Amino acid sequence: MERRLAAILATDIVGYSRLMEADEAGTLSALNSRRKRVLGPLITKHRGRIVKLMGDGALVEFASAVNAVVCAVELQGAMAAANFDIPEDRRLVLRIGINLGDVVVQGGDVFGEGVNIASRLETLAEPGSVLVSQTVYSQVRGKVPASFDDLGEHKLKNMAEPVRVFRLSASGSAASVRSLEKTTGEESRISIAVLPFTNLSDDPEQEYFADGLTEDVTMALAKIRHLRVIARDVTFRYKNKSSSVSQMGRELGARYVVEGSVRRSANRVRVTAQLIAGDSGIHLWTERFDRELADVFAVQDEIVRAISIQLDYSLIDAAVAIRRAAPAASLTAYDHFLRARSAFRRGAMIDAKNYLLEAVEVDPTCAAALANLAYFFAEDIYMQVSGEPVAELARFAEHYAARAIAANDGDPFVYRLVANAMVALGRHAEAMHQFESALSLNPFDTSATMNLGMAIGLAGRHEEGLAMIDRVFRLEPRLPPLNRANPFWVRCAMGDPEGAKADLQKIDEPMANHHLALAICMAGAGREEEAQTHVKAFEVKRSPWFDVPGFTHWFCRVLVLTADRDRFLTGVRALGYKV
């Protein structure tokens, strides 16, 4: 007979019989999913061992009481997060009891008073709470970032002596969820900025991987309803800058700053992430993740979860929507997708397209890559970078948009890119639906809001669209100048040459199509002589295959009002271009 000292965590689901009676298949599916995606990874992370699973319950052994308590905190937080958008009568809510004591080990199972006390504490716990014994409290006090409520001594079933019980007050309890659901408004959101992760790999070509991880962490945090995440386009301005983190935090207006580094070698990746107070520069949390490359998705989820817990145990944890982990089979596709996003930022559009095509060849259901392709071909209709005929570009955009919609399973990024493609194709009703889907999942997506404003403006509600875009700039005044293209297109549509000219001056490097659109807008307003300045700029920047009639056809297609189309065509004819 083997004996040892162990921290035992006992847990079960509140109201499991009721849930099974209401929906047996759905409950079992949800339970299996939580065990696979939440319980198992957290126990592994904190070096626990699942002794046994018992229907709706679990018995877990830890060598450390601290590890057991921290695991319980994260487990309740993750469960509350997963329950956030589920009706209250369908939620899987845990109660947890933890005891530190002597156990008897036989064939992998554990027995004895140490186990019995943990089980009795679990039955005593309220839904969503964690109870610990005096022995656990004595070991973890001052070692975990949590407070405890002393509930006094309790007489437990079949226990000769009463046990002093403490309630952990840091877990994501049902009360915390209800509090979160009642909390709304700008003042309730905590601002956070994710600085570009530093590439420490020997290969500078791996820069795209660090940038991709930065974007993924940013997007995952943006799904937390009560976080205000500084836009990626703003934070990427600080890439390779030597400013102190506290200075960058103050400039960004961020209460918290996340920074990190990535070292990728062969089939392994090491990610170091830190959470820093934006005003003081004090390091609040740091952790290193060493993983096989196939686990890169799990690494991202762990970073997001750890940051959210540090922000506010009792509130933010309850709202974390952990980013869906992509299947390992799509890792190569994901790698191509990251390279494409990096190429987009460099302006290497053809390279981006080729990487995306490689991604969907490897994984034909990679919704993000499919949506990016739809967006690329739709944008190319008026950018004219590939040399493909406009009719072919439209056909490709339609094809990949349909595939992205079919493959998407709730990613707001995919909804947004498909919406942008629909705008370029003149399918405004479908675009509005896709934008609404994106914003319902992430209401603080500045890109989706700004692009929706442009779509509304092009559809003829000019002032409403411009007002929406203006609100984004007021919230994020540090957005890059290229974003001024959004109001620029609306002002060209409504025949406001002065406003369009002012917006064009705020774009660092206007493209050929910008100058052509402004020239047409000016000519349509009777300012043909002034328009010639921008015609000349267009001729200098245009590609040899730029198709003015194709561009004209595209822009007329996205204009809903007859008056807007007629004014635009008047300008085209005044400049001597064929329609």
Image: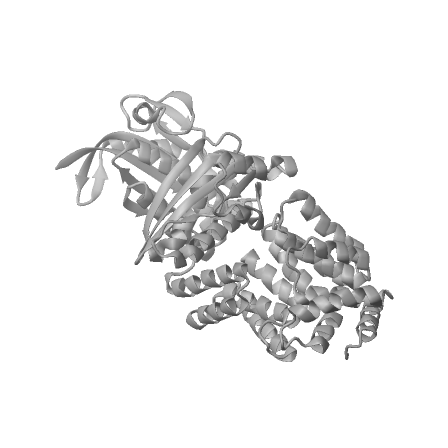
Of 538 and 476, nearer the camera is 538
Q: Is residue 167 depicted above or below 437 in this figure? A: above
Query: How many discs mark residues in the rendered view?
Result: 0
Q: Is residue 134 depicted above or below 473 in this figure? A: above
Residue at the far right: name it.
526
What colour scheme does the image use? one colour
* Residue beneath the point at 68% across and 58% down: 485
Residue 295 appears at what percent x and percent y? Answer: 35, 54
* Residue beneath the point at 28% across and 26% down: 159
Q: Quadrant of the C terminus?
A: bottom right
Residue 110 appears at what percent x and percent y? Answer: 22, 39
Which image quarter: residue 492? bottom right
Q: Is residue 266 depicted above or below 194 in this figure? A: below
* Residue beneath the point at 52% across and 51% down: 219
Is residue 32 in sight in this rendering? no
Q: Quadrant of the N terminus?
A: top left
Residue 237 appears at what percent x and percent y? Answer: 55, 48
Q: In the drawing, does residue 551 fall left or right of residue 211?
A: right
* Residue beneath the point at 51% across and 34% down: 246
Residue 404 appears at what percent x and percent y? Answer: 54, 67
Of 162 and 571, nearer the camera is 571
Of 525 and 382, nearer the camera is 525
Residue at the far left: name it.
1
Q: In the drawing, does residue 322 fall left or right of residue 563?
A: left
Q: In the drawing, does residue 482 fall left or right of residue 43?
A: right
Is residue 49 in sight in this rendering? yes
Which image quarter: residue 511? bottom right
